């Protein structure tokens, strides 16, 4: 389960985030490319844009549920 205190600083403020458990598997970036990006230097994903539509939110939730190491959280800061 993702831990808010371990989230990467690259994540934008909001409910979804990626923490230090990320293994750079690319699943979230493939599932929700409008919301997840890659830090090339660190080799991990992060949320660069919080979902703005129901469709984006559904894809972010799908990425969260599919993450093999549970590195995506949905308990981040509310805007």
Image (cartoon, helix red, strand yellow):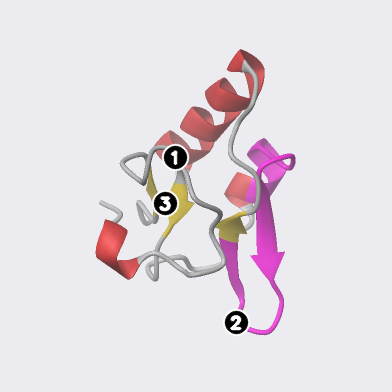
**Residue 37 percent coordinates (x, y):** 69, 57
Up the image or down, 58 lies above or below 71; here it is above
Residue sitting nearer the eye, 74 or 52: 52
Residue sitting nearer the eye, 49 or 60: 49
Do the residues bearing badges 2 and 3 touch, measured as CB atoms within 8 Å? no
**Between disc 1 and disc 2, whose residue precedes?**
2
**Residue 19 percent coordinates (x, y):** 40, 63
Of all residues, the one furthest to the bottom in this rendering is 41
Label 1: element kind: helix
Residue with the mark numbered 3: 68
| Label 1, label 2: how far apart the Cα atoms are | 20 Å
Disc number at residue 42? 2
Quadrant of residue 71 within the rendered picture: bottom left
Up the image or down, 10 lies above or below 3; here it is below
Do the residues bearing badges 3 and 1 touch, measured as CB atoms within 8 Å? no
Residue at 36%, 39% in the rendered image: 74
- Left or right of 50: which side holds 72? left
Up the image or down, 7 lies above or below 66; here it is below
Residue at 49%, 70% in the rendered image: 9
Residue at 60%, 82% in the rendered image: 42
Quadrant of residue 5 within the rendered picture: bottom left
Residue with the mark numbered 1: 64
The region drawn magenta spans: 29-45
- Left or right of 6: which side holds 39? right
**Between disc 2 and disc 3, whose residue precedes?**
2
**Residue 64 percent coordinates (x, y):** 44, 39
Mark 3 against mark 1, which lies toward the viewer?
1
């Amino acid at each position: 389960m993702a831990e808010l205190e371990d989230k990467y600083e690259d994540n934008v403020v909001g409910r979804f985030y990626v923490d230090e458990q990320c293994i750079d598997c690319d699943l979230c970036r493939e599932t929700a490319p409008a919301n997840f990006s890659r830090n090339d230097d660190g080799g991990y994903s992060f949320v660069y844009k919080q979902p703005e539509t129901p469709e984006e939110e559904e894809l972010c939730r799908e990425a969260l549920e599919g993450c093999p190491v549970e590195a995506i959280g949905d308990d981040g800061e509310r805007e």
